[in-house]
Amino acid sequence: MNQFLHLLTNAGIGLPNDVWVPSTSRIPPQESDQFSAELKTKPLKNTKFTISGYYKNLYHLRTFRDGALFGIREGADWEAELPEGQGRAYGVEASLEKQIGKYSGWINYTWAKSERTYEQLNEGNTFFANLDRRHNLNFSSLLNLRDNIELAVTWTYGTGTPYTAPTSILEVIVDDKVETNFLFGERNNVRLPDYHRLDFGVNFFNDYGWGKQKITIGAYNIYNRKNPFYVDFVRNRTDSNPLYVAEAVSIFPIVPNFSYSLSF
């Protein structure tokens, strides 16, 4: 596969930001070779089992240089601020589907690993990619309460993604003003807390001669798990040490939802 756009992602502290940049005469397209295999079987009645694996090599990857102030503008040599690297990703996925009468259930598990290597970054040492998530587990169930009513429940779990945390923080006085300097070590040296949530919904169907109606009532993240979206380091508001503390920011608490659809 070839891709002529490069996604640059900031995985440091603070709000993450993504930038898309095009391939140029100095930035070749990304390339990848992927190998995969899959086995499907039906070990029992109304039961399906699938297991698959993949291995992927990536070439001509680009990312932000450490400490670079990036901006695409006329006359700026922005291409020099994007070192080139390579990567690999591999994993195994297994899923099981079972139907018993009016009940259907699915469970899916993925073990995956994604690494990057840049000669000019992290002292040339391999580090985990921004979206490296070692374990993913998904469970879904669907129960037909009546011919026109069904209950759906989904639970999702995932290992926290890595980000680059500072190894030390220095405060210096410049022109009578305090400036904070974050000193970093290895890239993506810390992970966010594990991610999980529970969703549910009730679907109501009505079939008319002229069309079909569907009403859904449910909730996202029903037990209000505060899954961190990113981490920032802020000055400690108390008199105790340390001077700066990591503060996780979550953006999606429990969210009720309602939807109505009509087709004809």
Image (cartoon, rainbow, N blue to C red):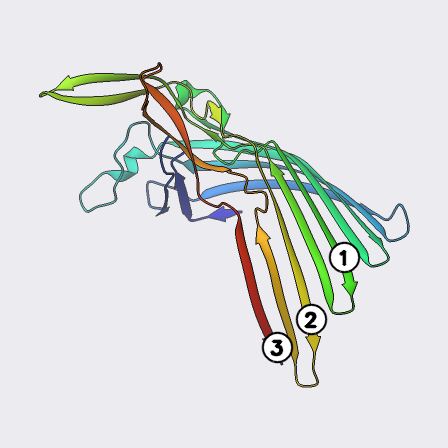
Q: Is residue 6 above or below residue 102?
A: above
Res. 139 image quadrant: top right
Q: Tell me residue 75's x, y (percent).
A: 17, 43
The residue positioned 26% from the left and 21% from the top of the image is: 181
Give the number of the disc on residue 248: none
The residue positioned 26% from the left and 16% from the top of the image is: 170
Mark 3: amino acid: Ser
Mark closest to the chain's N terminus, 1 or 3: 1
Furthest-right residue in this view: 45
Give the number of the disc on residue 205: 2
Q: Is residue 95 above or below residue 210?
A: above
Q: Which residue is mark 3?
A: 263
Q: Is residue 120 visible?
A: no
Furthest-left residue in this view: 175
The residue positioned 69% from the left and 71% from the top of the image is: 205
* Real-space CA distance between mark 2 and mark 3, rounded to the nearest whole angstrom: 11 Å
Front-most of residues 172 and 72: 172
Mark closest to the chain's N terminus, 2 or 3: 2
Q: Tell me residue 6's x, y (percent).
A: 41, 44
Dot 3, crowdedness within 10 Å: few (<14), some or many (≥20)? few
**Viewed as shown, does residue 180 lie left or right of 207?**
left
Res. 11 image quadrant: top left
Q: Is residue 160 above or below residue 142?
A: above
Mark 1: amino acid: Leu
Nearer the observer, disc 2 or disc 3? 2
Q: Tell me residue 232's x, y (percent).
A: 37, 30
* Real-space CA distance between mark 2 and mark 1, rounded to the nearest whole angstrom: 14 Å
Front-most of residues 210 and 39: 210
The residue positioned 20% from the left and 40% from the top of the image is: 76
Mark 2: amino acid: Phe
Q: Which residue is mark 1?
A: 143
Q: Is residue 160 visible?
A: yes
